[in-house]
Image (cartoon, helix red, strand yellow):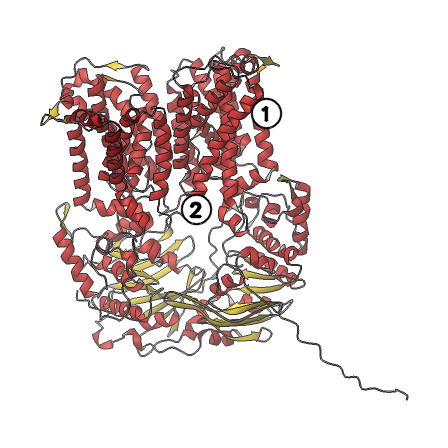
Amino acid sequence: MSIDVEEKFVTPPPAPVPALEVRGLVKHYPGVKALDGVDLVVRPHEVLGLAGENGAGKSTLLKALVGLVKPDAGEIYVRGERVRLRSVVNAAEHGIGMVFQEQSLVPNLTAAENIVLGSEGAGVRGGIYRWDRMRRLAQEQLDKIGSHIDPLARTDSLSFADRQMVEIAKVLRIEQRSQHPPVIILDEPTSVLEAKEIETLFAQVRRLREFASVIFVSHRLDEVLDVCDRVTVLRSGRSVGEVPTAGAAPAELHRMMIGSTGSDDHYHDNVATRAETPARPRLVVRGLSGRTFRDVDLDVHAGEIVGIVGVHGSGREDVCRALFGAEPTTAGEVTLDGAVLQLSGTRAACAAGIGYVPAERKIEGMVGPMSVAENMTLTRQRARCSGPLVSPRKQASLVDSWISRLSIRTPHRGTPIQRLSGGNQQKVVLARWLVSGDVRLLLLDHPTRGLDIGARSEVYRLMRELANSGVATVLLADSLEEAIGMSDRIVVMSDGRVTAEVGCPSGAKPTPLDLVKEMV
Amino acid sequence: MTVTVEQAAESVVQPKAAGLSQRLTAWMPVIALVAILAALTVADPGFFTQRSLTAAAMTAAPLIVLAAGATLVVLCGGIDLSIAAMASLSTVFLALWLPDLGGLATPAVIAAAAALGAVQGVAHVVLRIPSFIVTLGGMSIFSAVALVVSDAGTVPVTDDSTISWLNLYVARYIPMSVAVALLVVTAIALVVRLTPLHSWVTATGYSESAARLAGAPVDLVKIGAFCVSGACAGLAAVMLVSRNFSGNPSMADNLLLPAVAAIVVGGTAITGGHGGLWRSVAGALVVTLLRVGLPIVGVPSAYEQILYGAIIVAAVALTLDRSKVMVIK
Amino acid sequence: MLTSPAEDTEATVVVPARPRPRRGVSFRDAGPPVALIVIFAIFAALSPQFRSVANVQNILDAAAVLAVVACGITFVLMMGSIDLSSAGVMGASALAVALLVENNRNGNDLGLLGIALAILLAAGLGALSGLALVMLKVPSFMATLGVSAVGLGLATLMFDGVQPNISDAMLEGWATGRFLGFSGLAWIALGCVLLGWLIQRYTRLGRYAYAIGGAEEVLALSGVKVAPFKVAVFTLAGAFYGLGGVMVTSQLGAGLVQAGKGYDFAAITAAVVGGTLLTGGRGGVLHSAVGVLLITVLTNGLVQIGVSPYWQGGVQGLIVVAAVAAAVIPQRRRNQVVK
């Protein structure tokens, strides 16, 4: 039998096992579903971008991938093998490492020590440091990314960009532990870099592709499209799609990030009850600059709710705090009802009739062990005092009246506020600014964060009533839908500057898509 | 302004049973006081007599005042380590000023001590120096001044007519100094309790950042607390001088540890916010009974120091608010 | 309707102020040695007695014990903790060694072993502080305050009303003997500083103590168990204090309960003045050694030019407050919580 031509059956090469795969990851926090079934695939030797707006679940997903947070349900597979990540060190053993947003280096150690921290190996024998070996171990990692940093330089003597290199080298060391190409997560690495440094970073990331897989998270979509091979988009704790970046347009990504425009009818927008907006604005901000924001102009009229939207790094939270005197400013002028404000401190702001509800309710908003009554009466004393003395009778009737007006569910006015549910706690914090009856400007920083639907709805109604009674409000909302639903005007900030202003009258509301363009 | 909100159905209160340790620490000083009194009476049945109890109370008076004043600083979240040195310095001042100022010497000394306390408070608030460093520095500065001014020696008091009333008795059994101490503590406690100060102090101690963002005058409250602590040190000095007929640059130095022990045994948390002046009074009584009682029970007084040390560590460990301090240094 | 701001500004990204990289020798590193030279020069000019060889020897002898104590406290400060226990621990070890070597109270004659045991006792007290910190979560200033009291109590117990005078030739010789013009104590101090520097630079204990002060959370994230290192540092510090107590007994020829009086605060002052930050993460043994010399020169010089020695403590108090204020002021932020 002569074999001349045989048909060779060429079986297609099997699909490469993903470096990292996530299936149906779920994580709940009280009142909020951070992850609601996330799927993700990271192929070997690729740079995967991760995009999504605030609250989409990006940071929770990253924390779960690196072992900082235990998911409630779902699976994580590393190179096809199911793993349970118990800690950062455990994740490193499986080959997953993250370059954190806030630098996680020990500033007063050398770069080499930081790179090998916790796994010094041959660098330390019997508790004694062998500096030559430390240098060599560190140099191995630095060579991978082509960095020329002196390994024995003190970390806080390095530039910010160099420190990021050290962090990357530190994460690369994972390879020693897991013997496999690592998965490296870069979380907003460009936030604090200047243009030239960003280019260098991108070059490094492309190099990394040769021997690792990278997950690249950034709120700047142009960067994501530039350096990544594919992009996965998250929305409301779910993956809504992945696209190859070649030939993708930002608009497509915006659409995926936002989804269908949400209905806003639970924002209690009742045109009929709205009073006429006065001509002159109550709050006038011109050229306000601070550490994280520059040249911010803002006008807020009495009875108006102005929402400021922006993603990570927009600076909007600091603008709010600066208006309350809790954040120093380097330039700018602020006038309230015609009078120039000094903003030297929070007391001055309170005296001027400005109220502030912080985002971190548990740490900055309320004093946990103190009672509902005490929390409510912390700011304004005249309402509960006769002369210099606190009148228990006055305080009791004052507090009780507000408890009933705001429907605060508490067993008693003397209950420690930390025993109340989040929604009721927030109402107490809000009431603090209302007891005196003379608040003129309210600054609300994520007022519905961590509240369930019912509580949110109550807070929205309260905000509407306050606006209708003449209070000027600045709102930093939890989501674009909330901002659009509640605000009369929206100011968009990005990377420290105001980039757009949008009118938001009921009946002619902008869509989240319109806004996202300016935010990223 | 009419604002109403409709009720929403939601679970309202997250009940949290007060832990056993919490309840224990709330009653700690009283339990300790009763236990010690019982133990001492068992060891020496002659102890529970009016005479020895009165003597013990008289010893306790300066400590009560000292501890109460410093408690205010601790409630705000700080600590005042200079109280003993301040009291010693004040004894020197009093002994030196009595001949010239007569009856005015007492208020003058108290005012001077209050002023020094306020200076420490200002340094803490304005320079952002941790309170224990400011008062540690203050401690050595006050000691040095006392040494120089008194020339490192005892300053005798020849005419004690203006302060000897402290050695009298009220209603024949209660030493005047004790009555004054309790009166002063009551006065301070009332002023704090009945005015907004209570809210401000507690908020500052529990969560200074939240207090500031709520508009509480945190800086003024802290300075005021240091001022009161100083004034109390001055008053304690007056009591000491009336008993010893002299002033001495190290007269009150050995009261620092007992005062700190009194505050923590009383159940005031070193983290701030939780506690009270009356607790420190109970703590001061416990500490004094310990000191007075050790020889009665047959324990050499050398163990006093060891006891203070162990008590301080144990009491702080029990009353510390763990949730507050993430990284303890 | 979407409106963009009217001016077409070159909307550059606002980069928040970043921590500036520290390059070169900082003021904190160079300042104290320069200050030392300057102050020495000033006093040398003001008082001929000051610049005599005998006086310089005096200075070094006086600095010896403080240097050893400062060595120990430096490690604690580098971690970001504080140690107020040195006075009590020194008292305990001073009495212990006085009763273990040849003395007039009992028949012991343990010599070097006695010294070692006294240092071991002190190390144990230090370990107590560390354990109270990591296990009971008592803040270090409270824990060490308590341990100081315990140490003083132990010393009082050992003293038992009768002062033990030592007659051990070697121990006495530390203070009286001279080698190359410097007393044995000065040489011991030099050795301690050297040992401390080696530990700081070349051992894991030293480097991790430094790291704990710089960023403790990062260490924990990297899987390092921080607690045992904290206890070890306090134990090491206790050992140094113990040696200091033994040196005081050598100086005085007897064991005194108040052997460590004043050293606790002086050591903190010396460390802070030398450039070791109270918040941890900066400074070191060499810095503290310079600080010790600075303080001793200052004290000695002031006495030489006629200032009352009583002012010593006060001057130190002022210096510490000023030094801490100077260190803290550049890092001030509004709403920063200072306890």
Q: Which mark is residue C191?
A: 1
Q: Which amino acid does label 2 sit on?
A: Val
> Which residue is pictured at 42% across the width and 71% down the height?
A515
Q: Residue furthest right?
A: A2
Q: Residue shown at 39%/32% (left/top)? A: C321
Q: Is residue B106 above or below residue B200?
A: above
Please name whichever residue, A481 or C42, is drawn nearer the observer in this view of the structure: A481
Q: Residue furthest bottom?
A: A1
SS class, disc 1: helix
In the image, residue C310 lies at what x, y percent?
Answer: 37, 18
- The residue under the point 43% across, 55% down is A292
Q: Distance between the residues labelled 1 and 2?
A: 34 Å
Q: Position of A199 compared to C152: left or right? A: right
Q: In which quarter of the image is the N terminus of chain A?
A: bottom right
Task: State whether residue C233 is above or below residue A270.
Answer: above
Q: As drawn, is A362 to the left or to the right of A240?
A: left
Image coordinates for residue A324, horizontal then vertical, percent = 31, 54
Name the secondary structure under disc 2: loop
Quarter of the view holding residue A427 = bottom left
Label 1: few (<14), some (14–19) or many (≥20) C-alpha neighbours in 10 Å: few
Q: Which mark is residue B327?
A: 2
